[in-house]
């Protein structure tokens, strides 16, 4: 069997994830990080923090460059984050050292990675909302949907907490909230996704209990969410997200997909 049913062509019908699957790919992760790097450079150029021509060259190049995820493996093993290796690959691909030396200027790898993650989680919540709205309304689904506006306002935000001015400008450019505690926010989102899965897995009283597939998937989402919540303040908090958050997100979206009415 594969390590995850969500990226398996054999299990794609049993555990469907729909459009959410594309959000948890290396391609999506790198494109989001490059978007943040390009936006950072443009903002810094406008502020006069880096040369204007360099900022706009980086911004344009970030939308065009192609980076092979496999080429980042050695850097990830050393740094436990993909951002330094991505910046090095971007630098090399630009072939313009007079400009590329300003990539990620003044930002931490965590700032870039966290903001990029928020861009993908924003899309994920939109897909989850649409999936919940497609289900027959119950008290549980209505309650989960009612929590969504506050969740977006609280938990979908840029990083850059150590530079509030830069963080606010990047947040505005990317249509994110202002800086917040990303580790706590990801866990708040995971908790909401778990609640959405629970709401979907419990059909109206007139129906039977959840199918074995739905029950197994819900158990996985609940268990992984519990593990993720326990890691909030741990030194390995970011790595715990790498391990568990994609499974929670895709597990929840898969469950929402499998229980929707057949006519949809």
Image (tube, helix red, strand yellow):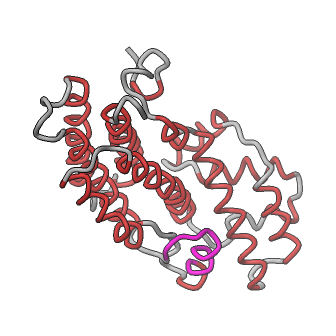
Residue at (35% x, 63% y) in the render: 148
Magenta run includes residue 226? no
Q: Quadrant of the C terminus?
A: top left
Relative image position of residue 207 (x, y in whole percent): 14, 32
| Rendered residue at 37%/29% (across/down) | 262
On screen, residue 203 versus residue 34, left or right, reads left
Q: Is residue 93 left or right of residue 238?
A: right
Question: Between residues 225 and 230, which one lies in front from this camera angle?
Answer: 225
User: Which quadrant would residue 185 be assigned to in this image?
Assistant: bottom left
Q: Residue 50, image x and y in percent?
A: 78, 77
* Residue sitting at x 31%, y 50%: 193
Q: How many marks?
A: 0
Q: Is residue 176 magenta?
A: yes
The residue segment tinted magenta is 167-177
Determine the residue positioned at 42% across, 29% down. Answer: 16
Q: Is 173 or 181 nearer to us in this picture? A: 173
203 vs 12: above or below: below
Q: Position of residue 251 (x, y in %)?
A: 34, 37
The main secondary structure of the magenta stretch is helix
Q: Nearer the viewer, residue 119 or 260?
A: 260
């Amino acid at each position: 069997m594969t390590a995850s049913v969500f990226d398996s062509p054999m299990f794609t019908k049993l555990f469907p994830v729909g459009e959410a699957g594309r959000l948890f790919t290396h391609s999506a992760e790198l494109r989001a990080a490059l978007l943040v790097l390009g936006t950072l450079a443009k903002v810094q150029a406008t502020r006069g923090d880096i040369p204007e021509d360099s900022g706009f060259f980086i911004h344009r190049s970030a939308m065009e460059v192609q980076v092979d995820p496999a080429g980042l493996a050695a850097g990830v093993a050393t740094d436990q984050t993909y951002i330094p290796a991505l910046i090095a690959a971007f630098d090399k691909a630009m072939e313009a050292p007079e400009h590329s030396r300003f990539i990620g200027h003044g930002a931490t790898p965590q700032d870039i990675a966290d903001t990029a993650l928020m861009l993908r989680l924003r899309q994920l919540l939109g897909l989850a909302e649409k999936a919940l709205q497609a289900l027959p309304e119950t008290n549980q689904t209505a309650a989960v949907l009612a929590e969504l506006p506050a969740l977006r306002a609280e938990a979908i935000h840029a990083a850059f907490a150590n530079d509030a001015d830069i963080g606010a400008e990047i947040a505005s450019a990317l249509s994110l909230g202002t800086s917040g505690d990303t580790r706590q926010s990801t866990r708040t989102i995971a908790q909401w996704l778990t609640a959405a899965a629970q709401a979907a897995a419990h059909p109206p009283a007139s129906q039977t209990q959840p199918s074995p597939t739905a029950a197994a998937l819900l158990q996985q989402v609940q268990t992984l969410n519990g593990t993720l919540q326990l890691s909030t303040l741990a030194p390995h908090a970011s790595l715990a997200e790498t391990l568990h958050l994609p499974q929670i997100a895709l597990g929840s979206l898969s469950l929402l997909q499998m229980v929707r009415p057949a006519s949809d």
